[in-house]
Image (cartoon, rainbow, N blue to C red):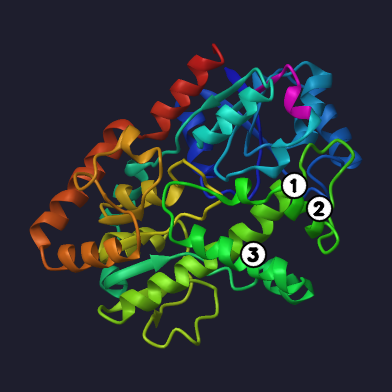
Amino acid sequence: MKKILMYRWKAYNYKDIKYTFESLGYEVEEVYQDLLNYDVDEEFADRLKGIIKGDSYQFMFTVNYFPLISNVCQEAGLLYVCWSCDNPLISLYHQSVFNSVNRIFLFDLTGVEEFKGMGVEHVYHLPLAVDTGRLDYLFSNSKDESLYQNQVSFVGSLYEKNSYDKMEFTLPDYLRGYFEALMEAQKDLQGINIIDRMLTPEILMELQQYFELEKSEDSLSDLNLIFSVTTLGFKIAQKQRRSILIELSKHHDVSIYTNSNIQDLLRVNYRGSVDYWSEMPKVFRNSKVNLNITIPNIKSGIPLRIYDILGAKGFCITNFQAELPMFFENEKQLVWYYNERDLKEKVDYYLSHDSEREQIAKNGYEYVKMHCSYEQRIHELLETIKL
């Protein structure tokens, strides 16, 4: 039997991917250990080397990229295959990305083009997926769906604990004003990311006096990348999500499922957090409108949340992402918006046009079932690596 080694961690789509490999005839052996660091953990590296030497695997697979694992596979001469579910992967900005054993699959096309431009040879575009069979089985055995009925719902974080808030008042007035203006501009832009080009050499030179850049010796990341992703990206997501929920809740019954603190969002119904596997699909199926608000760190790609909504037969309204027209038709399988005003108008319209909304949800489900299954994606991955 064909055998692969998988590093197991908390990625949402890990179980679906593992099950798919098994259904395609692979024996999957798992290795798990909390990593002290993504690129240096000698204890885990030694353990992994021993596992690889002790058996025969076609390749090692991870969800997202781990420099440590790539380096161990390079030393062992074992093919290392990874598929991203987050973007950008700061762990990819590392010397190990040039290892010859790597086969890197990214769901964000912008990242593929960037790494190809850096000279990374084996990097490919692979959109994310959904297991409609798993979701259909969940619903066929569900008896509590009435508990998850909503008019408009959003599932996700409000990022109220972000590093920008912790450092904001250490910045001089000019820098703070510049970043506020940049974040307000980005907040209202859909499908385009202006953060990188606005972090000019002059701004970065001044910022480095106030921002401590922590990275390993082999890291290729710089102040622009780290600050734009880990600091500005999360703060902009907070601003976008709060603004949208506040505005929509003035006109409609809006619910949020989150661990975030929403005490000051007075009109928004707090519904607590939900389990990804057993509860979240019921929210998507039983909400008239499901919002997807993509974090700006995902520059062009389609996030997992959209596939999760459509696979649950939910109606999805999402911000515009550059890759959406490559795979979907607006107002046929889902609906995308270009700004907050456009979103409000579309929510108003589809809440008052039930048959159109329900038909779009049905079309979306049929589309992802036919074209976006894990089996299809893994087949494409295996064909690309010629296995």
Q: Is residue 106 magenta?
A: no
At label 1, the amino acid type is Pro
Lower sequence index among marks 1 and 3: 3
Q: Quadrant location of the C terminus?
A: top right
Please rate how many residues cluster around mark 2, counting C-alpha atoms within 10 Å: few if below 14, some from 14 to 19, many from 20.
few
Q: Position of residue 240 (x, y in %)?
A: 47, 66
Q: Which residue is mark 1?
A: 201
Q: Position of residue 84 (x, y in %)?
A: 57, 38
Q: Which residue is mark 2?
A: 205
The residue sitting at 50% across, 57% down in the picture is 186
The residue sitting at 80% across, 58% down in the picture is 206
Q: Position of residue 353 (x, y in %)?
A: 10, 63
Q: In the depicted view, which residue is nearer to us: 176 or 154?
A: 176
Q: Is residue 375 above or below residue 322?
A: above
- Please provide the residue range marked out in magenta: 96-103
Query: Mark number for residue 217?
Result: none
Do labels 3 and 2 touch, CB within 8 Å? no
Do labels 1 and 2 touch, CB within 8 Å? yes
Q: In the rendered image, which quarter is residue 103 located in?
A: top right
